[in-house]
Image: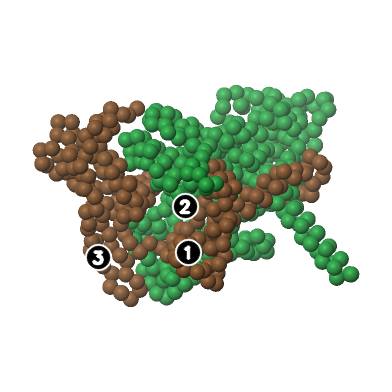
Chain colours: A brown, B green
């Protein structure tokens, strides 16, 4: 690193101010949130939660910061394996029911069954199902099922129904017996909207 | 009085140090190396996504355009007493034509490749940043931590002088004589932002983890390795059993905390970064989280000054005596100033020494006097022309246009810090 030698080697005050604002903005944005109860005002903050609570209430939600970070794409939040790592193994499959009553089983890409190269390529399927298989996001289910209908389409015998299944297994803690079997649960039954399927057939490059 | 004056001086000195750290000037080499590694990883990430482009970015995929917006917008009401949402950079906003979406995707991938090469870097890095931000805002539902790293770092690359070093822009500029070979100094604040943001990632994730009871009771690493969906390569069983799990749990917390704090303390920097590399190697080996570890590790370069990297390359070159090559120019000729500047920039390890020859044509000899074919011997030793050498006319240019008659004024032979050759 070199000392500024001339005017040419000095950073303007405006740039310095913008950089300082940026540092401040990303710092307050990435601060961990307080617990849900504290954040919603149901429980008063205590101890170190005060800082998180105050940050969330007054800084993080302030218009200049959220406007700047959200618009530009500098928004960020870092919670890899936090606050606790996932303890649930999760995968999906589906049954596609056709007009003539026949059923085809559809295996949504499952990382465990893939080769190393395929795991690299398909990891996003796992991430997507982490969200699309959650009861918190039911608005994702229709598109999920519709795509499966499209992937299993047959013009002569179109799919009329898609049943989505979620298979999960909890990892037991140290010293406890590990459950080997997955529990299966049908979490969404979709009656295929033929007009949407038709639109998908017409689409494409 | 004296105490107050000392305090004031201390404050002033601290402010000056901080100003020097954040806004000082230095070599752009570290940013250039970061651009190559990170640009390539971003390109690779887009290639992996390309296999399933239709699945993730078309209207026939799992996430049509409206669904991506639905995921984003309810969460970002701007306030001011209104219901309107924060606008986001997204050239794909409302686009339902798959051809346009594919075009944007391909342009972004091309921009990633050009940014890696450092070709038209200013434009290509801005296109890359806008493209990545748009793709992330088009389909935010498949994003993981590595994607957020890509988005944020691509934005930094767009505002940094990314093409000032280790780039085709510079090499071509030197060949064409558009820029001088004098060392460049750039303001280091973009590099500092990359380093600070990386530290922030580790620090906040450590803080977040400390709020989880599994991290506090020392059993957190017990769980991810038992998730079949994350399984990659086999690991000796004892590592995933107690008490090793406790060691890896607290070890992870400690290393991540150090990467967020102690890494700025120079005497500890190398040790902290090495432990971070080990942590990410282990994550990458044992768990299927594609590219994440590579993306995180690539940011470590931002903790080194460009001058340190140049010195390191210089030291490495000096130690590898077997790799050194003496190149004899045709009799009666010397290298032009332009050629010297070009060769300085492509011969990263300073392995080639250009000397006056007594023959009609060029000749190349190893340190032990063995003769080598000129072109391949130079090519192998100059990372800066690994790609350029394949362009038509490069070697003709090199063998004819880099020379000037000895009578003319100029630098007789290539400058060499170590003085391996004499004029």
Residue at image point 27% right, 47% down: A108
In space, the residues marked 1 and 3 are separated at their CA atoms by: 41 Å
Alpha-carbon neighbours of circle 1 within 10 Å: few (<14), some, or many (≥20)?
Answer: few
Mark 1 or mark 3: whose residue is earlier in sequence: 1
Whether residue A67 sits left or right of residue B308 in the image: it is left
- Indicate which label's residue lies in the foreground, 1 or 3: 1
Q: Position of residue A62 (x, y in %)?
A: 57, 52
Q: Residue at x 59, y 47 (%)?
A: A64
Horizontal and vertical percent for residue B27?
71, 45
Q: Quadrant of residue A24?
A: bottom right
Real-space Cα distance between discs 2 and 3?
Answer: 29 Å
Task: State the residue position of label 2.
Answer: B145
Co-location on one chain, circles 2 and 3? no
The chain holding disc 2 is B
* Residue B422 percent location from the top left of the image: 79, 40
- Kindly identify the residue that appears in the image at 44 percent across and 74 percent down: B217
Q: Give the quarter of the figure containing the N terminus of chain B.
A: bottom right
Mark 3 crowd level (few <14, some 14–19, many ≥20, 10 Å Cα) = few
Disc 3 is placed on an element classified as loop
Q: Determine whether, in the image, residue B70 is placed left or right of residue B415.
A: left
Look at the picture and state if B322 lies above or below B372: below
- Per the rendering, the mark at residue A41 is 1
Which quadrant of the view contains residue B399?
top right
Residue A70: mark in rendering: none
Is residue B257 visible from the viewing direction of this image?
no
Residue B23's spot in the image, x, y percent?
Answer: 72, 49
Dot in front, 2 or 3: 2
Spatial distance from mark 2 to mark 1, Cα to Cα?
29 Å
Residue B236 versus residue A67: which sits nearer the camera?
Answer: A67
The residue where tag 3 is placed is A180
């Amino acid at each position: 690193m070199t000392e500024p030698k001339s005017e040419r080697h000095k950073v303007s005050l405006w740039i310095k101010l913008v950089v300082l604002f940026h540092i401040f903005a990303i710092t307050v944005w990435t601060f961990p949130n307080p617990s849900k109860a504290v954040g919603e005002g149901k429980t008063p903050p205590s101890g170190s939660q005060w800082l998180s609570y105050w940050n969330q209430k007054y800084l993080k939600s302030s218009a200049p910061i959220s406007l700047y970070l959200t618009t530009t794409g500098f928004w960020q939040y870092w919670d890899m394996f936090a606050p606790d790592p996932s303890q649930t193994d999760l995968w999906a499959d589906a049954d596609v029911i056709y007009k003539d009553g026949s059923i085809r089983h559809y295996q949504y890409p499952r990382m465990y069954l893939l080769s190393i190269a395929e795991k690299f390529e398909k990891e996003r399927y796992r991430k997507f199902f982490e969200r699309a298989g959650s009861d918190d996001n039911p608005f994702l289910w229709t598109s999920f099922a519709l795509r499966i209908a499209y992937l299993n389409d047959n013009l002569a015998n179109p799919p009329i129904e898609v049943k989505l299944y979620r298979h999960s297994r909890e990892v037991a803690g140290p010293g406890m017996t590990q459950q080997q079997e997955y529990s299966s649960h049908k979490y969404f039954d979709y009656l295929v909207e033929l007009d949407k399927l038709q639109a998908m057939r017409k689409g494409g490059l | 009085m004296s105490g107050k004056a000392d305090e004031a001086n201390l404050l002033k000195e601290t402010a000056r140090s901080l100003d020097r750290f954040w806004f000082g000037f230095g070599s752009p080499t570290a940013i250039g190396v970061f651009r190559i590694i990170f640009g390539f990883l971003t390109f690779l990430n887009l290639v992996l996504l390309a296999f399933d482009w239709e699945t993730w970015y078309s209207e026939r995929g799992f996430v049509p355009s409206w669904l991506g917006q639905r995921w984003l917008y309810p969460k970002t009401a701007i306030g001011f007493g209104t219901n309107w949402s924060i606008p986001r950079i997204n050239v794909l906003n409302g686009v339902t034509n798959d051809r346009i979406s594919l075009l944007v995707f391909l342009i972004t991938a091309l921009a990633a490749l050009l940014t890696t090469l450092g070709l038209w870097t200013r434009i290509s890095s801005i296109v890359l940043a806008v493209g990545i931000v748009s793709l992330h805002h088009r389909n935010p539902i498949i994003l993981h931590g590595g994607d957020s790293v890509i988005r944020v770092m691509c934005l930094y690359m767009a505002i940094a002088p990314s093409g000032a070093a280790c780039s085709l822009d510079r090499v071509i500029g030197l060949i064409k004589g558009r820029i001088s070979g004098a060392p460049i100094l750039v303001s280091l604040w973009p590099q500092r932002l990359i380093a600070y943001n990386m530290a922030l990632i580790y620090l906040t994730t450590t803080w977040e983890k400390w709020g989880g009871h599994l991290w506090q009771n020392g059993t957190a690493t017990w769980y991810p390795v038992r998730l079949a969906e994350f399984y990659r390569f086999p690991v000796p069983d004892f590592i995933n059993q107690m008490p090793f799990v406790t060691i890896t749990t607290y070890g992870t917390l400690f290393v991540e905390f150090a990467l967020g704090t102690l890494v700025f303390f120079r005497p500890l920097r190398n040790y902290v970064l090495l432990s971070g590399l080990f942590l990410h190697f282990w994550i990458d080996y044992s768990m299927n989280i594609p590219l994440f570890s590579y993306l995180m590790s690539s940011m470590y370069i931002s903790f080194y000054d460009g001058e340190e990297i140049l010195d390191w390359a210089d030291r490495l070159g000096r130690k590898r005596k077997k790799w050194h090559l003496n190149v004899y120019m045709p009799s009666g000729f010397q290298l032009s100033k332009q050629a010297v500047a070009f060769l300085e920039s492509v011969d990263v390890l300073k392995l080639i020494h250009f000397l006056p020859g007594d023959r009609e044509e060029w000749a190349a000899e190893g340190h032990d006097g063995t003769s080598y074919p000129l072109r391949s011997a130079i090519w192998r030793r100059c990372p800066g022309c690994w790609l350029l050498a394949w362009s038509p006319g490069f070697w003709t240019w090199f063998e004819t246009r880099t020379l000037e008659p000895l009578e003319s004024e100029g630098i007789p032979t290539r400058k060499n810090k170590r003085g391996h050759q004499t004029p």
